[in-house]
Image (tube, rainbow, N blue to C red):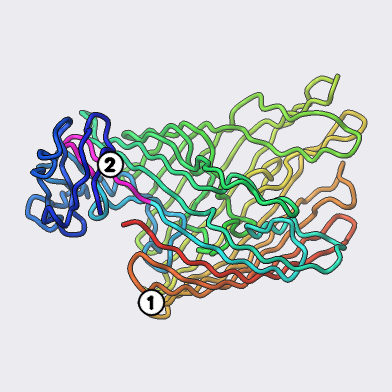
Amino acid sequence: MHASDVLGQASLDTVSLSESGGPDGSVVKLAATGTAQELQDAEVVDSGAENFSLDEDGFYAVADGDISSASSFFQESNPGKGIGSDFFGLNDSYDEGLIISTGKVAMKIGGFVKLDAIYDFNAINSTDSFDTATIVIGALPRKNARLHARQTRFNADTRWESPRGPARIFVEGDFFFNQRESSELGENRFRLRHAYIQHGKWLAGQTWTTLADVAASPATLDFEGQVASVTTRRAQIRWTQRKLFGTKLALALAVEDPFTIIEVPELVVGEPRTQTPDGVFRLRYEGDLVQTQVAGVLREIGYQKKGMPVIEDDAWGVNFTQVSKLTTRNKFYSEILWGNGIGSFRGIPDFAPTVGGGGTTLGSLGWMLGTTHEWNEKFSSNFVYAENGITNEHGLMGDELKRVTYMAANIIYTPTERAAIGIEYLYGTRVNFDGQKGQANRVQFACTYYLP
């Protein structure tokens, strides 16, 4: 492991931590400027030394206390954390890995490399992830084999102490820029996942929408994930108050980017209009064994047919989630997503214009049940079943999507702390408004290795 010229003005040659006497979990403290010889003489702090401590606020103090990872400040509460694999969580721990510090500012480099090997037994157009909305109904029999590493992620987590408490900038990306279409390979282009600054009660940037509860999302090897979970990321400004009135409640309020999906019929030409940002709230109970959350969104759907005024309609949605730690090796999670004009939070339409110039906002209802079980310290399994669909059909054609289902079951082997190998079976269906139905069966193998 090497520390290199990563921080601003620190133009220094690389040096091996092991050559400097630092064990895994060391922090290399770099001066703002210096020579290669000065870097070799840089202080390497043992993470087990006495000058590392966990203070009463849960801040993991580094060296003389100038830097703290503030785990209780940054990390979302999750009673099931540590049970099974976690493909959603961010790199919140600052007690190990490649951390480069100037004494006042620290940066940690994280991420993972993931290889997916996929085999489809039925016709589905989403070959890199199991998007059941893309199941082809009435297609001639066909199969698909696919290997890719597009879920590979890299991130940089920078933290520092300010006069008003700890602050953080987090940036992460992967290579899932787009899907492969027909027989052409999709581009392995780097794309932005998270990019935000967090300071005090405020967050600004792009990250999980406030409507989401990723703690209640199952650990599927499939990148798409089940059809009822809200796992979209939106640009936003968010305010959060934890321990509301001294209780275990946390309240968050946010304004977010109003992304929409419009189901446009043939012969209609028009574009969606986003005239106001989404207003989102969530109230979460953060217990030791149970976390429950209710979140809601108010939004305005806009659509403009060519040569016509903008059509506007109010939209709303609520998301109920919970995750429970049943035993030290079992957790259970569930979700109900219900609303009008919120389909885009799960990749289905919000609004359907009609040929005559009007349109209708589409209602949707989704639900999910799932569980994680650890067989022992090396093996864990996940099972999830979910449904999601449109509850009204006015303005929609018979061959348009009415309902999708998703089922996944896997077993994951963790031979070492930072490696995971798994195999997963996936089954899904798509039903159209005319009653036509299609199904898809997939087997997916994945191998993941995490940076410390």
**Membership of 106 in magenta stretch:** yes
Judge whether 82 appears above or below 94 on screen: below
Q: Are marks 2 and 1 in contact (CB under 8 Å)?
A: no
State the quadrant of the N terminus: bottom left
Specify the label residue 422 is tagged with.
none
Mark 2 or mark 1: whose residue is earlier in sequence = 2
| Residue lying at 58% horizontally and 68% vertically, measured from the top left | 384
Q: Secondary structure at mark 2?
A: strand
Mark 2 residue type? Met
Quadrant hosting residue 24: bottom left
The residues colored magenta run 100-110
Measured from the top left, where is residue 167 in percent x and y? 29, 35
Specify the label residue 378 is tagged with.
1
Judge whether 247 appears above or below 237 on screen: below
State the quadrant of the C terminus: bottom left
Mark 1 residue type? Lys
Residue at label 2? 107
Q: Secondary structure at mark 1?
A: loop
